[in-house]
Image: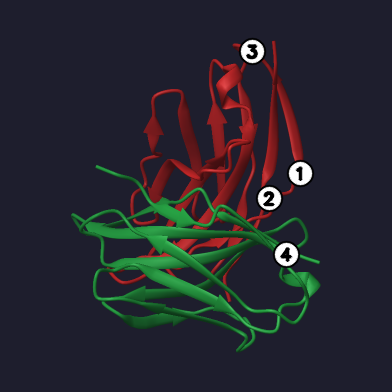
Chain colours: A red, B green
Amino acid sequence: AQTVTQSQPEMSVQEAETVTLSCTYDTSESDYYLFWYKQPPSRQMILVIRQEAYKQQNATENRFSVNFQKAAKSFSLKISDSQLGDAAMYFCAYSLSGGSNYKLTFGKGTLLTVNP
Amino acid sequence: KAGVTQTPRYLIKTRGQQVTLSCSPISGHRSVSWYQQTPGQGLQFLFEYFSETQRNKGNFPGRFSGRQFSNSRSEMNVSTLELGDSALYLCASNLLLGGLSEQFFGPGTRLTVL
């Protein structure tokens, strides 16, 4: 079974600084997706960034980027120029690739605090 | 385009009762997934429906069931409620676009079992 581990229950960062959230996963599959989701206090889960395992290039979305190390099964999220609105719970998630695979396996989450 | 709608947003029940939660996906989306979120267990996959058929199921007891209607709206039912069923229940509206799956989450239903 696939597992996702987030070893940092809480992290804090100063506004405008950079923070990196860690995630490791375990799978015997070679083709899969990895995600970072953000859940602000309002509870609506939002997709931050996605990485396809077959792509060597790390995904980037504006201030958000990932460091995907497939051999190490590591998938960290870097948030640059942190903003107050980035404060939220961040979940790392995994799913198998393929059209009908919508099942997400989540980590326990990292609560990010942004200090002004 | 309207987002994912979940009703009710909050619910209080007592042990032994049953409850039905509803999810309306984004228009045009035919797949819906359900997740349970608790402080202890985190986010856990319950099941996924596509065109009225359950395609995938998580590791939950038979008290948890679901269904999907022809308009893609989905309901999940929990019978004989236990205190441990208190959780945020999230619904995701799923779409396959260009070979990539996209999942859009609703605001959730907060269930409290007393």
Say which of marks 2 and 4 sits in front.
Answer: 4
Q: Quadrant of residue A95?
A: bottom left
Name the disc covering residue A15, or none: 3
Residue A110 visible from this viewpoint = yes
Marks 1 & 3, CB-CB < 8 Å contact: no
Does dot 2 land on a helix, a strand or a loop? loop
Q: Are marks 2 and 4 on the same chain?
A: no
Precedes in sequence: disc 2 or disc 3: 2
Which residue, given by chain and number where applicable, does mark 1 sit on?
Answer: A9
> What amino acid is found at the position of numbered circle 2 in the picture?
Gln
Camera-side residue of A18 and A29: A18
Question: Does residue A12 appear left or right of residue A75 in this picture?
Answer: right
C-alpha distance separating marks 2 and 3: 23 Å
Placement of A42 over or under A34, stated as above or below: above
Question: Does residue A53 appear left or right of residue B20 in this picture?
Answer: left
Q: Quadrant of residue B16?
A: bottom right
Name the disc covering residue A6, or none: 2
> Could you tell me which residue is drawn at 63 percent across and 83 percent down?
B79
Precedes in sequence: disc 1 or disc 3: 1
Structural crowding at the residue carrying mark 4, measured as other residues with C-alpha within 10 Å and reported as few (<14), some (14–19) or many (≥20): some
> What amino acid is found at the position of numbered circle 3 in the picture?
Glu
Does dot 3 land on a helix, a strand or a loop? loop
Q: Are marks 1 and 2 on the same chain?
A: yes
> What amino acid is found at the position of numbered circle 4 in the picture?
Ser
What percent of the width, then of the height, locates residue A21? 63, 37
